Amino acid sequence: MVLSKANILALVLGYPLFTVFWTVVFWTRIAGRYQPTWESLDTRPLPDWYDNAKVGLLIHWGLFSVPSFGSERFWQEWKGGNHKFVHFMMKNYPPNFTYQDFASQFKAEFFDPKEWTEVFEASGARYIILTSKHQEGYGMWPSPYSWNWNCKDVGPNKDLVGELASAVKSYTPQIRFGVYYSLPEWFNPLYELDRKNHSKSNTYVSTKVLPELYSIVRRYQPEIIVSEDDEREPDSYWNSTLFLSWLFNESPVRRTVVVNDRWGSGTFCRHGSYFTCYSAGTLPPHKFERRISLDRHSLGYRREARLGDYLSIYELIASIAETVSCGGNILINIGPSPDGRIPPIMEERLRQVGAWLDVNGEAIYASIPWTHQNDTITRGIWYTKDKDLDRTYAIVLNWPEDCLLFLGAVEPSKETKIFLLGYETPDAKFIRLKTCPKSEANGPGSSLCQELALHCCFEGYSYHLSGMSYSYLCFRME
């Protein structure tokens, strides 16, 4: 007779077999679950897809897109007495006009989710995040917990989150879909009541926030959830760990979902799949994401924006190179118009980024930080490394003076081969490439520098090197 573990436990402990069996089942299930504590939740590994993606888009779209003035925080600024916003309202709207009156003007009549996905694909982004609810509280989906304050009940009469989620999954399955959700709402009376009670009550959370979060996940299955808090209430008020334990254990996206680090005061840069506190330039100890907005002054659409208010393609590529070389992801923010269009200048920037990634993507996607993040001699050079192959990439952001490029972090061997991505065949022009030892005493004029031939390139193109212990550039070195 062969005894099972349950049989043996029953004999040793003297308990009935039935009791021991269900005890074993219970503890087996508990052992494989994330508990609603940060100590447990922080042990969850980061899904590989997010680390490999590198480039994402954040879409700030909501009722604030209707006045399209100042910033996405229009309501708060107006009601807070900011003269710029107060004057704008006095000049352009009748005296009794309220923020709620903007809802009927939110039409999204030109919103074409399939067309949006074509732009996303052309941009080279590997994930997109749509605002499902901003601090204004207006729902971009038919939330049953936000009656007459969502895009189905008042405004476009559409499920905007649902239509975009469906389009992304249908037309661009290689792109992951995510949502942004603000925990607080500026003028929600339930939230204000909880705050007056010093957060000893959480009626707003139990009747609004948590039901909406569970509903969004079940309905749209977002693989990224970007939460927003005001750093005033602790995570215990928001019941954040309870929701996240369900998200990681039982939700339909439990194996692939990632979350940020804004789940109540004390969680920023401490708890989350990735952190948002680091900036490019140094190699941080934790996976991070850096957000940049195409409009320097607003996350939402602004009608008064001028050409100089938008980032140039050079600034975008520089931000991507700096961030990815330090192990981070870059999140590029855009703000659609209230009629549902991605503004042409934003579409142009996204397509320009995509064109650059078409050539240099192998230096970005699924890369890992190299020994050096930037060069020790020449400014504007950022390095990445292929995680599987013996290849190092150097992204050069500035045209080398006299076509002579000095690299202080590169130590090539006799077997090292250098390629300019996009120009794999010999060209009539050449850049001379010199690599210099790491010693601070050596500089571009040192006799120890070795000169290599490199095909001529355009600014911002990559090179690739492999078979070397050190390297850097948007060259490929092998």
Image: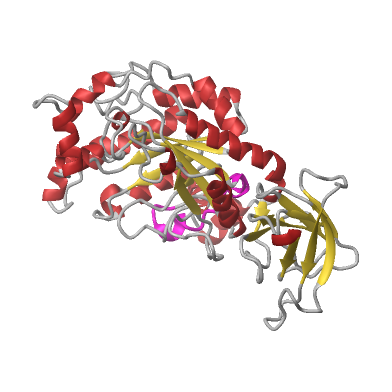
Segment tinted magenta in the rendering:
35-53
Residue 93 vertical placement versus 266 (above, below):
above
What percent of the width, then of the height, locates residue 474?
Answer: 71, 53
- Taking the view exactly as shown, the residue that stands out farthest to the left is 95
Give the image quarter of residue 68: top left
What percent of the width, then of the height, locates residue 467?
Answer: 84, 62
What percent of the width, then of the height, locates residue 399?
Answer: 67, 55
Asked if residue 188 can be seen in this view, the reply is no
Residue 349 vertical placement versus 449 (above, below):
above
- Taking the view exactly as shown, the residue that stands out farthest to the right is 414
Please tell me which residue is depicted at 61% across the width and 58% down the height of the picture: 325
Please tell me which residue is depicted at 27% across the width and 56% down the height of the picture: 234
**Would residue 355 be found to the left or right of residue 315 on screen?**
right
Asked if residue 428 can be seen in this view, the reply is yes
Q: Is residue 68 magenta?
A: no
Residue 422 vertical placement versus 151 (above, below):
below
